Image (tube, grey):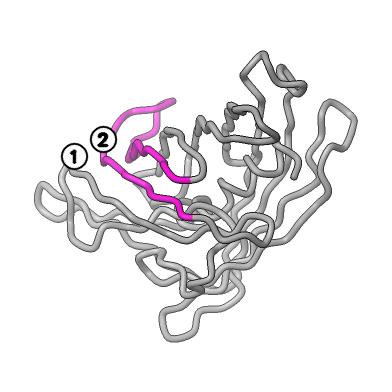
Amino acid sequence: MNIFRIGILLLAGALAASSFGQIAKKGNAYTFRVKYTPGQVIKLVSETGVENQGSSAAGAKLKAPMSLKVLNVTKGIATVVIEIGAGMQGKTPVTSPSTLTVKLDSLNRPTDKTGIPGVSMTMPEKPIKPGAAWTSILPVNIGGMVQRMEGRYVFAGIKKVDGHDVAVVTYALSGFANGTGRLMLLATDGSMYGNETHLSLSAAGSIEKIHTVVTRSK
């Protein structure tokens, strides 16, 4: 599988959560939940690059549009469609467009136990204070193969970024791929403001390092 495709797929599930999150302050703690509304749409742009110089793809960068749409919500379970446009390296297409569908509850837990097509951030069940951490272990389906991925998340608090108040969540991923990242959610409505991930995984006998930045599309 194309190394760029792996990087994009790893992000897709996480975006399904972060794009529609809600943050409510209760005393000195915060509650994280996902509230879905049928027809809700968020558009994003993903930029991915291979960092290690030993790779044949080193220095290459890929840009791809992404959109997330809530099709329906039934008994608290939302069906979210993630559309990933053609990945472009300059003016040259590198990956083909693809569509992913996930079913998630209000804590962003996937209902399909065979593995979602990406890495998903499960929301903490109880209100948390800045500095609090939580973990989730999920099956991840990459190219038809179910792999194990564990995420450890830390709520870094409410920060000022580009003039916006955002909730910052840092995370570490481990399993068939390892990495770290930072997710930012707008404090006003809980929608995603940005996500940055550094991943390291074995591909074709070498270690690939992938850096991906996702931002809201204007």
For the magenta stretch, what is the residue range?
Answer: 148-175
- What residue lies at 52% left-to-right and 33% top-to-bottom? 199
Question: Measured along the vertical axis of the image, is residue 133 above or below residue 34?
Answer: above
Residue 44: within the magenta?
no
The one nearer the camera, 172 or 165, is 172
Would you identify the image quadrant in which residue 158 lies?
top left
User: Given the image, on which type of amino acid does mark 2 rest?
Assistant: Ala
Question: Measured along the vertical axis of the image, is residue 159 above or below residue 139?
Answer: above
Q: Residue furthest front?
A: 205
Q: Is residue 53 left or right of residue 178?
A: right
Q: Quadrant of the N terminus?
A: top right
Q: Are marks 2 and 1 in contact (CB under 8 Å)?
A: yes
Q: How far apart in space, not on screen, are marks 2 and 1 (Cα)?
A: 5 Å
Q: Quadrant of the C terminus?
A: top right
Q: Residue furthest right?
A: 92
Find disc 1 in the rendering and name its residue: 130
Q: Is residue 98 left or right of residue 21?
A: right
- What residue lies at 40% left-to-right and 44% top-to-bottom? 185
Residue 172: within the magenta?
yes
Percent position of residue 107, x then y: 35, 65
The one nearer the camera, 180 or 56, is 56
How crowded pointer 2 is (Cα within 10 Å; few <14, some 14-19, many 20+) is rated as some
Find disc 2 in the rendering and name its residue: 156
Residue 149 - label = none
User: Given the image, on which type of amino acid does mark 1 rest?
Assistant: Pro
- What residue lies at 65% left-to-right and 38% top-to-bottom? 46
Percent position of residue 15, x then y: 52, 51
Percent position of residue 55, x then y: 71, 21
